[in-house]
Amino acid sequence: MRGALTAAMAALALGAAGLAHAQEAPVPGPGEELAPDPAALPLVIIDPGHGGKDTGAVGTLPDGTETGLPPRRDGRGRTRIYEKDVNLDLAVRLQGYLVGRGYPTVMTRTTDLAGGDLPFRGVSRDLRDRVRLANRAAQAARGRESIFISLHANAFRATSRGTETFHFYASGAPARRLARLVHEEVVFRLGLPDRGVKTAGFFVLKRTSMPAILLEGAFLSNPDEALLLASSDFRQQVVEGAGAGIERYVREEDPSAPTPRPARVEPLTIRYWVTAGVFARRSVAIKRVRRAKRLGFDAVVRPRLHPRLDRKVFHVVTGQFIFLANAKEMRAQLRQAGLPGKVGSAQAPDRTAAARR
Ligand SMILES: [Zn+2]
C-alpha cells in the first residue's frame, strides 16, 4: 500500500497548491460572492471507477468517433468506448474544477491502473485498496471534513437512459444531501431522464468513512448516450454538475441541522457476521483465513466461547453487517468461491451466563 499512499499524498499536495492559490485571491468587493474560508473546504476524494484489466462497461460507437480518450477497438475492428477511460477523464476534469476553486483533492487512481495506481489483481482487492486509500487520506486531512465521489458510467439495456446517483442504504444526512445536490445539478445540465437518487450496498459507499456517493451520469450500454459520453463537452457538463453540487453542499445551510447542537451520531449496530468456518484450533483457522484471502475475501480469526461446548472456538469472519440482506449476499459469494459461508449473530453469546454454569 506504500505506492497507494504516496499517490494519495502526491494528489493531496496538488490540492494543497490550489489551496495556497485560493488564499491569495483578492478580497471580494460589495455584492461579490464571498468565497468560503479555504480551510473550511472539505477534502474531496475522487474515485474514477474501474481501471487496468477492469474496463467497466463497454459501449459501441459509430466507426471512427473521436472521443478524446484512448482509442479502443474490439476484435472485429469496431470502435468501442470503455467506462474506465470515461471515468478517469471525468475524475481529472473534476479535480481541475475543484483545485481551481481551492479544494484539496485526492484521486484513488490517476492512470489506467487499479485503485492506488496499483496493478489490477482482482475486483475485491481493487475496491479494498480504494477504500483504504480514501480512509487514510481522510485521516491525514486532520479534522478537515472529507467527502467521497465515485464516478461511473452506467450499463444495463441498450434502451436504458438517464442519470442516477447512489449513497449507501444506511448513510447519514450528509451523504444523502450530497447525493441529492450533485444529482440535481448533473440532471439539470445533462437534461437526460432523471432516474433519481438511489441507495445501494456498493463497497466503496459502504466501507468509506466519509459521506460517499456514486454518480452514473449516463448509460454506455445505450448507443445514443455512449455517443454523448464520447463527447468531451458532454463529459465537462457532467463534471460541472458534480462540481456545482459539491459547491452547494459546502455553501448551503444544511436544512436537516437547523440548530447548531452537537450532531447526534445514530448508533448502527452490527448485527450479523459471515463466517467461512469455525475451528477448534487457531492454526487451522489461520489456514482458512489464508485461503479466503487468496480468493479475494477480507478474513480475520475471532475467538469466541462456544456456549454449548463451553470452550473457545475460532471463527473465520469475512464480514460484519448491519443488514441481513448484505450478509446473505456475502454468504452467497463465499459459497460460490467454494467456501462454507454461514451467517451468524455478530453479538457474542452471554459470557457471564456461560461462565456461571
Ligand atoms: Zn462502473
Image: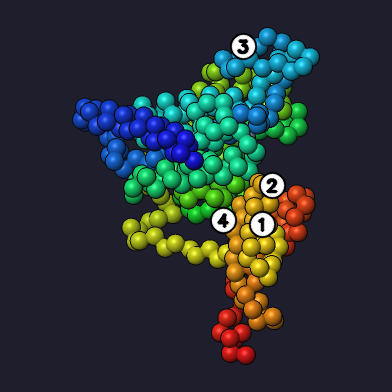
Report which residue position mark 3 lands on: 66
Cα distance in 3D space between marks 4 and 2: 28 Å
SS at circle 4: loop
SS at circle 2: loop
Q: In which quarter of the image is residue 356?
A: bottom right
- Work out whether mark 3 precedes mark 4 in sequence or the reverse, and give the earlier one: 3
Closest to the camera, between mark 1 and mark 3, is 1
Residue farthest toward the front in the current orientation of the protein: 283
- Work out whether mark 1 precedes mark 3 in sequence or the reverse, and give the earlier one: 3
Front residue of 194/65: it is 65
Cα distance in 3D space between marks 3 and 4: 41 Å
Q: Residues within 10 Å of mark 1 (few under 14, many from 20)?
A: few
Specify the amino acid type for callout 2.
Leu
- Work out whether mark 1 precedes mark 4 in sequence or the reverse, and give the earlier one: 4
Report which residue position mark 1 lands on: 287
Instruction: Specify whether 118 is left or right of 309.
Output: left
Residue visible at 63% across and 36% down in the picture: 121
Front residue of 117/174: it is 117
Closest to the camera, between mark 1 and mark 4, is 1
Residue farthest toward the bottom in the current orientation of the protein: 357
Q: How crowded is mark 3: few (under 14 residues within 10 Å), some or many (20 or more)?
A: some
Cα distance in 3D space between marks 2 and 3: 40 Å
Q: Residue 295 carries which label?
A: 2
Q: Is mark 1 within 8 Å of ligand 1?
A: no
